[in-house]
Image (cartoon, rainbow, N blue to C red):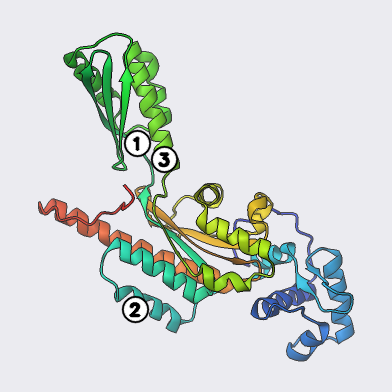
Amino acid sequence: MSDNSQLDNPTLPELSQRQERILALIVQEYTKHPEPVSSKQLADHNSLGVSSATIRNDMAQLEELGYVASPHTSSGRVPTTQGYRYFVKILMNDAELPTAERALIEQKFSEVPSMLEQWLRQAARLLARTTQTASLVTSPAATSNTFKHLELISIQGRLTLMVLVTTSGAVHQRMLSLAEPVSQLKLSESAERINTLCANLNANQIRLKTRFLPLLEQEVVELAADLIDTSGNQQYRVFYREGLSDVINAFSDGVAAQQAVRVLEERPILEMILAQFLQPLMDDNNVQVIIAGNEKLDEIDRVSIVLSRYGIPDQLSGALAVVGPTHINYGRAISTVRHVSHLMTDMMAQLYQEEHNKEGNGNSNTVTLDNGS
């Protein structure tokens, strides 16, 4: 049984052992050659040990349960969305890429310069080529965005400039119009109090502090919290994509192909998917599987997405994914995404350690870890 997916239907009807075997074979055959699978095919090419008539009866029961469908009266069966979900959740073993392919991917990474942008582009290329789907990789960003410090600068009269810096490195500037003029000395004193009170706090923690502050400082702190929230929602700034034009022909209809294009090209949809389905970065880099939107998003009800995080737990993380039709090779997609995410995590740790060592030696010729800032 695979534990790599985030599926939301725990009440899938149970199947007999033979029905499970037949469903698995139908999914495997269909993902290789997207044509209806007949009972004769299964009887001729697999060791089920039963007659074609018995297989047909089991296929009919699978159809009644909603796991397969018959496109035409006399045709074979094709997996349904529910069939794919049952296969991924219950039947699919934890597949691994062949050793030679894993080694080839590692070699391809070693051939590019030790620069984050080059690694991200290479990851997108290798994901697309290995899985024969479209791929997406985001740049890494700070896992948690918190308050670092702010400055309040008197401009003219009641106008004051607020400059906020967060722990992710983002810098926000906002012009404030105060109720009355305030001297630079008082503005600096207010900024110092706020910096002491709010250091390393997130937006919600900062808001809890407002009731203890004078009115001016309350308003500044509320604005700072709003800006931190906004920058946190825009975590993924840079995207690298590969393989969309090559995979379009794999979709059975124009609507499905259009959905794949929207996932990869329309930032609001992509960010919604990442926010809703992608789990926090963990040591084992869990791989998540979204089949036809997992009954949550109609915008992607004809595509499948396999995705994961990479990065340094509690510090930096990015996302990587492959996108294709629902008949993608799930075992290959999951194992490839897992392997590439592990490699990216290892390389991020290496970059981070090298950067830490440089800072400790007073050498500031740094590699930018968040190239979206």
Q: Is residue 4 visible?
A: no
Q: Position of residue 216 (x, y in %)?
A: 32, 14
Residue shown at 29% from the left, 76% from the top: 111
Which residue corresponds to mark 2? Answer: 107
> Which amino acid type corresponds to the residue marked 1 in the rendered image?
Thr
CB atoms at circles 1 and 3 under 8 Å apart? no
Foreground mark, 3 or 2, reads 3
Residue 223: assigned label: none
Residue 354's image quarter?
Answer: bottom left
Residue 232: assigned label: 3
Q: Position of residue 68 (x, y in %)?
A: 79, 69
> Which amino acid type corresponds to the residue marked 2 in the rendered image?
Gln
Q: In terms of secondary structure, where does tag 1 sit?
A: loop
Circle nearer the N terminus (1, 2): 2
> Which amino acid type corresponds to the residue marked 3 in the rendered image?
Gly
Foreground mark, 1 or 3, reads 3
In the image, 109 versus 287, the foreground residue is 109
> How far apart in space, not on screen, are marks 1 and 2 (Cα)?
38 Å
Q: Position of residue 352 (x, y in %)?
A: 26, 56
Circle nearer the N terminus (3, 2): 2
Residue shown at 87% from the left, 65% from the top: 64
Above or below, 8 against 133 in this view is above
Residue extending farthest to the bottom is: 44
Which residue corresponds to mark 1? Answer: 146
